[in-house]
Image: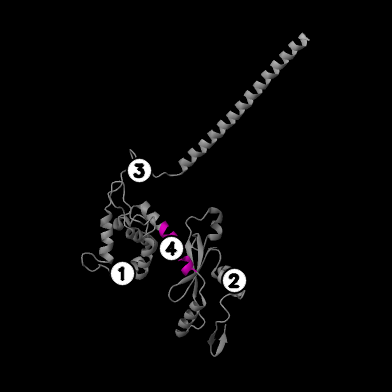
Amino acid sequence: MQTMDVHDEERSDDMGGAVDQDDLSSGLAMALSHHLRLLQLARRVRGCQRRRRRHRGSVRGRAPNKKRDFNVGLRSILRDYWGVDGEPPVFDEAAFESRCRMPRAVFMRIYSDIKDEPFFLQRVNATGRPQAHPLQKVVAALRVLGNGEAADPPDEYVRLSKSTTNAAVKNFIEFIVYKYESTHLRTPTDEDITCILAFNQDRGLPGCIGSLDCSHWEWHGCPKSAAGQHKGRSGKRLIVLETVCDHDLWVWHVFAGSPESNNDINVLKQSPVFSGVVRGEWPPRHFYFEVNGRRYT
């Protein structure tokens, strides 16, 4: 009995040691796998930080900011188009519409809607100096969009850097799409169609509800895999933009994305407007016009 007890105690000690070794090895494996996961996560974070350009403040060895006088840029705009110190503006309404590509009333409507947006608000920097005025950012965006300028030339007039001008263009486009797309880029209502038909009837175009045209725009960022179908006769990579507008230049339909290899007839066959006409969904059937005494719908 005593011999059996001794053997049992030895066996239990061996089993206890084996259990301790198994627990230790499993714990080490779990710690090692956890450590490898942490290393992988840290490697991913460092990779994202290297790819993402961080906006930092003053850094030793970095070129200092240019001393732009924002008040000079704002005063130049006000002097040229609104007048300051009781003096009339330098440029008249025709010049204003030619430079900004829109009448003053439309400009003021857009400006009153956009000036309270977070990007266009006038900020104050860490030194307490006010930054660019909302009017400067709007004018810079219109210079780039309306005149096809780069982001550098407006710096001499509105006193904004290239990065700020690019950001102004991006935010201006996003605001226009968000604010006015549902109002203007839509199918005309019955009241709109009635006004358009009446105007075109008076000028000798009965039944005309808009002018459709296809314009060709160069695509600088076209990938090589799609270069063949987007290459036109000029050798450039182009896309076709189909638009419909009325006599007031209200563009109520835009269809973009067709490659340059298609002609205008093929683009028209793909157009949602033409598809609606073929299916008899649009324009409404209760509208009609007369030509030589015959009624058409």
- Residue, disc 3: 57
Asked if the residues shown at circle 3 and circle 4 are in contact, with their CB atoms under 8 angstroms apart, the answer is: no
Q: Main secondary structure of the magenta part?
A: helix
Which one is earlier in the sequence, the residue at label 3 or at label 4?
3
- Residue, disc 4: 176
Point out residue 258 in the picture as x, y percentages from the top left corner: 54, 63
Q: Amino acid at mark 1?
A: Ala
Q: Amino acid at mark 3?
A: Gly
C-alpha gap between disc 2 and disc 3: 55 Å
Point out residue 61 in the picture as x, y percentages from the top left corner: 33, 38
Asked if the residues shown at circle 1 and circle 2 are in contact, with their CB atoms under 8 angstroms apart, the answer is: no
Q: Secondary structure at mark 1?
A: helix
Q: Is residue 69 left or right of residue 250?
A: left
| Up/down of 141 relative to 46, above or below | below
- Residue, disc 1: 95
- Magenta region: which residues? 170-185
Q: Which mark is residue 275?
A: 2
Name the residue located 56 percent from the left edge and 54 percent from the top edge: 225
The quarter of the picture where residue 285 lies is: bottom right
Q: Amino acid at mark 2?
A: Ser
Q: Is residue 212 left or right of residue 134?
A: right
Point out the frontmost of discs 2 and 4.
4
Point out the frontmost of discs 1 and 3.
3
Q: Amino acid at mark 4?
A: Ile
Which one is earlier in the sequence, the residue at label 1 or at label 3?
3
